Image: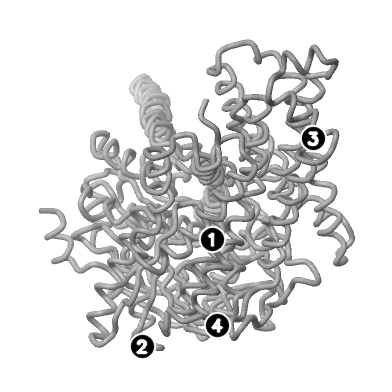
Amino acid sequence: MRNLAKIVTFLTIGCALVAFLCIGPTTATADKKPIKVGFIHSMSGAMSMYGISSEAGAKIAVMEVNKAGGVLGRELKLITRDDKLSAETGLREAKDLVLTEDVDFLMGTISSAVALAVSSYAEKAKKIFIVNIAQSSQITEEKWNPYVFRINTNAVPYWGYAPAIAAAKTWKPKKIISLGFDYECGKNSLAAFKEKYLALVPDAKIIDELWAPLGTTDFTAHISKIANSGADALFLACIYGGGEIAFTKQAYAFGLYDKMKMIQPCAGDVETWSDVKQGDPYPKGALATCRYPFWAIADPKSKAFVEEHKKMVGFYPSYGAMNAYETIYALKKAMEATNSVDSQKLIKALAGMELSTFIGKVLIRSDDHQAMMPNWYGIIAFTPDLPFPHITDVQIIGEEGYHTVEQIKKLRK
Amino acid sequence: MTLEAALGQILSGISLGMVWFLIAAGLSIIFGTLKVLNLAHGSIYMLGGFLCYHVTSSLPQTPWAFWMALIIAPVITAAVGGLIEILLLRRLYGLDMIYQYILTFGLILIIGEVCKLVWGVGYNTVAVPWPFKDTVNLFGLAFPKYNLFLIGMGIAVFVGLRALIGATGLGGIIRAVTHNREIASALGINVPTVYTGVFMLGCWLAGLAGTLMPPMSVVALGADLSVIIDCFIIVVIGGLGSLSGAFLGSVILGLTTAFGLYIIPKLAVAFGFILMIIVLILRPWGLLGEPD
């Protein structure tokens, strides 16, 4: 009996040891292996502000998630790569992230060219790719594939439909003149604005279309023409960044902001005007859209996010940062819902999912995987709350700003 | 078209043209004397813009800051031009034109990267200086004073350069070297010094234009290439190497752009090129240029 007891004890300890050595540790490492998110963005060069800001947004979410115990008991890990605004580099980095870093997801990009290159690779590699800034509507419309999601606005609402809805809900100008950069984005922007606005205000008319070569910084002759055109509103089609600052200075000098209604789609985003002080030229009284008016968002989580972002990189968060933050939470929600990191299962979970974000409930449409991120609009002014000009009396445009699923189906044919 | 509208287009067209003239004049003078087509001329203009921003924002914020920059920045660009001529360009005079293109194209990349390293990729602005802040009322047309100042500067520089080259001893030397460098050299003129001086003058003009632009516009990367195309159109229209041609070409292109917007707005972007093609067909050496 004693021998038997010895044998049983010995066997038990042996089995336990074997179990511990063979099974235990493997399951333990599998549990501890982090879930990796490959983050591809423009981290250097002309657009790097957006890359740095987006990375900060994603990092803040990753830190919060890990602090609260990670996802499925595993840690989240963000691996950043610079696409240098080049589709070739972006694609190479995406491949490297998948093949050598073995990432579970891809996210990022400001350049639509990079986004399109990465999205076609994501389909081949069977990895989910979530776009957080790139605006080209093709990404989720004509050139869409099931692995691509976008938690961000796109060019249709941003450059066309949202300003059209905003103008129709506020001023309803009847005679509009337009000025745009003479390239694809400018033309698409005006076409979308025209289509939506004329549907909403049928007796309105676009009386003239003015174009300037991409990169123009002297708009004096255009402004002089606009001032004498007899139009009651100007629509600025896809003139942004340096061009927009130059235009605004010259239009301000001409007194154009006092003379007519100005519809300036990009002017609501914080990054262009955050250095402008009271007394400097700014788009005074212009109707502008905006993709993250954090001053008008009541949720304390948003306020904390703004502070955290400022602490991390030293400036106010761009809309890209907010999108990147919500992207990490969307992935978390999908993984927890399916108890898996499998692409196929997650695609099913994400498509049609309603995200609870600090800007409100946002639906990811199942037909185009486009999150119905709102576009806000308001009148640009200085208020005592902020040191820079910003949209005031902020209103929101949701799904009505996007192409309908029927429109997209037609485009995909 | 009302009188007010016509006046608005005339003035804004000329003000547009005058900044181009300052750049194109430098390009043209350099080509006239050195027979070098400086592709990096737009980069010198952009450098002038960044220097204007740098000087204006470094000095105490008084109305004088910009005016100091207007003196300092072009002098620095002229010095940079001098260094480029002495250290780099001088070695290529005897060689095929292609070497000049390669060198000056390389300079575009180098100057662009240096500006990016020093001033970053953001958009910098300079406020409109005293006393040109607001608008002036001309026959019912509110026109910014600063644009009138630009027109005045363009005309003053044109008259000044004409006088310098046409009516001074120094101008005589430049004309002699332009006309025939061997004979000028045989007559005891120090040709390399004249070359350096003319190249510096051209870069000073580009720097001056670069300094004048920021108060009404923005200082940012990319200005180098967008402006050089307009300047090439101007010198083709006016005649490469001709100062008066550059002036005439600038006024014509400015007015064409401004009135093109009135007549066929959708095609206004193409008018400069159409004009250039017409001149190239009818008078390939330019309106005021001389056939070889």
Amino acid type at mark 2 = Lys
**Which residue position holds label 4?**
A285
Please state the horizontal and vertical placement of residue A138, each as a whole percent of the image. Answer: 26, 52
Tell me the SS state at disc 3. helix
Residue at mark 4: chain: A
Label 2 with label 3: CB-CB less than 8 Å:
no
Q: In the rendered structure, which disc, 4 or 2, sits on the residue that comes first in sequence?
A: 2
**Which residue position holds label 2?**
A172
Label 1 with label 4: CB-CB less than 8 Å:
no
Residue at mark 3: chain: B
Please state the horizontal and vertical placement of residue A363, each as a whole percent of the image. Answer: 30, 68
Tell me the SS state at disc 4. loop
**Which residue position holds label 3?**
B171
Left or right of residue A174: residue A85: right
Q: Is residue A294 above or below residue B35?
A: below
Residue at image location 87% in from the left, 56% down from the top: B59
Q: In the rendered structure, which disc, 2 or 1, sits on the residue that comes first in sequence?
A: 2
Residue at mark 2: chain: A
**Which residue position holds label 1?**
A318
